[in-house]
Image: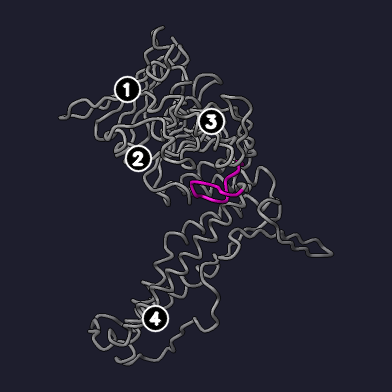
Amino acid sequence: MRIKQISVSGLFGIFDHVIPLNMDERITIVHGPNGFGKTAVLRILNGLFNSRYSELKTIPFSTFQVAFDDNSYVEIIKDSSDADKIDKKRNISFNFYKHGLEKCSFLLKSAKARADLDSLIEIFDDVIPGLRRINSKTWRYIPTGEALSIEEVIDRFENLLPSKMRLIQEPDWLEKLKDTIHIRLIESQRLLNFVPIRSSKYFYESPTMLPTVSAYSDELAKLMRDKFTEYGTTSQSLDRTFPLRVVKQQLSPDLTDEQLRSQLNELETIRSRLIEVGLLDKDENSDFQIQPQAIDESTKNILSVYVEDVEKKLSVFNDIASKIDLLRNIINKKFMYSYKQMNFSKEKGFIFTTHYESSSSSNSKTLSPTDLSSGEQHELVLLYELLFKVQPDSLVLIDEPELSLHVGWQVQFLKDLQEITKLADLDVLMATHSPDIIQDRWDLTVELKGSN
């Protein structure tokens, strides 16, 4: 199930917007003057599907509706009566409509009394890296400078908190809807956020933090090592049964010598590509060349099983190799102007080197990801999130990417995004002011207009 249209009325008490999504192209660009609600729409949508209910409470709107491609829809209604303004926990209702089913409803309210939370909030500073209490009701999140209420802290960092601190008890129908529709918001000011090194529910020691580029580099290194381990396990399993399968193999009479050579050459091409992106170690004996003379039937039988096995072994890397390859190609094209080149390894993740040649000398130096400029880090984090942090069939919300991209990168951004959406199987809803990003693709845009 996919989102096909988003509607909001009474946004900031002024605006009514309808945003149909481009279902075929899979990229929708929202543009309009400052203050018309581009970012607010993204935040409300993210708040709905990621249980960030503080967003729904703080952003002024009357109704917010999300329609799906199966003709069902969910609607949020904010009751703006004076009586309900006093109790903000009870003024938001959710309704889900689907043909042939009864309406499902939910009234947003706190599952816990404030007194129950007072005994728990003392652990906030211990379990959430970068959070500092500034008064009895407010915390400051150091990486972004934001002041957060108790509800906002729990909304934002629920994954780091014990389950007993959950404020909202959601109905089953809403849980199922959220399991079906996956939303990820990438905000411009958070691309250089900090992330905790640990992922456990409790931090028994003082939490340590890493710049996002370093954390993602470490994360990718682990993903690469995990895939290499899976490759080893698959290889061992196939190698154990190889002799038996050779004996039992019934060779296809249609398999020619030329086809077999072509298959082996293709495998070597794939193997070389995997070595190039750091997933396989270079093995001097891996190149399996066959002499031009005819292959006897016995050898052909062995080689046909060998080809099948190697295809299965190398297929373990298909998904991650394609993503690494695309990330490398995009980054290297963009970083070429500053003489930087990106590679990868299972030990270090991202590897950056500088290459500069003059008439009299040639210089090369290895860089840490944190040595990149802030704009380069923004670009790397954004691309990594799109390729590796978002699950397939998600709707990714990107807020004003131009804030971190110079004009030359903005011009190429949409083309890069199209490649990523195809490979990673994503939909994108992007808010932007930049005609350099849109280029000639105004057919992908939806303009937010003022009240008539």
Label 4: element kind: helix
Crowding around mark 3 (Cα neighbors within 10 Å: few <14, some 14 to 19, many 20+) is many
Q: Position of residue 310 (x, y in %)?
A: 39, 76
Give the residue drawn at x 62%, y 48%: 208
Residue labelled with disc 3: 432
- 106 left or right of 19 in image: left
Which quarter of the image is occupied by the C terminus? top left
Question: Residue type at mark 3?
Answer: Thr
Label 1: element kind: strand
Crowding around mark 4 (Cα neighbors within 10 Å: few <14, some 14 to 19, many 20+) is some
Residue labelled with disc 2: 24
Distance between the Cα atoms at labels 3 and 1? 34 Å
Q: Earlier in the sequence, mark 4 or mark 1?
A: 1
State if disc 2 and disc 3 touch (CB < 8 Å). no
Q: Earlier in the sequence, mark 4 or mark 3?
A: 4
Give the residue drawn at x 70%, y 57%: 367
- 415 left or right of 180 in image: right
Label 2: element kind: loop
- Vertical placement of residue 266 versus 416, above or below: below
User: In this rendering, which labeled residue sits more in front, label 4 or label 3?
Assistant: 3
Question: Residue type at mark 2?
Answer: Asp
Q: Position of residue 231 (x, y in %)?
A: 43, 71
Q: Earlier in the sequence, mark 4 or mark 2?
A: 2
Give 270 or 248, whichever is nearer the viewer. 248
Which secondary structure dominates the residues rendered in magenta? loop
Question: Residue type at mark 1?
Answer: Leu
Q: Earlier in the sequence, mark 1 or mark 2?
A: 2
Which range of residues does the magenta coloring cover?
192-205
Residue labelled with disc 1: 107
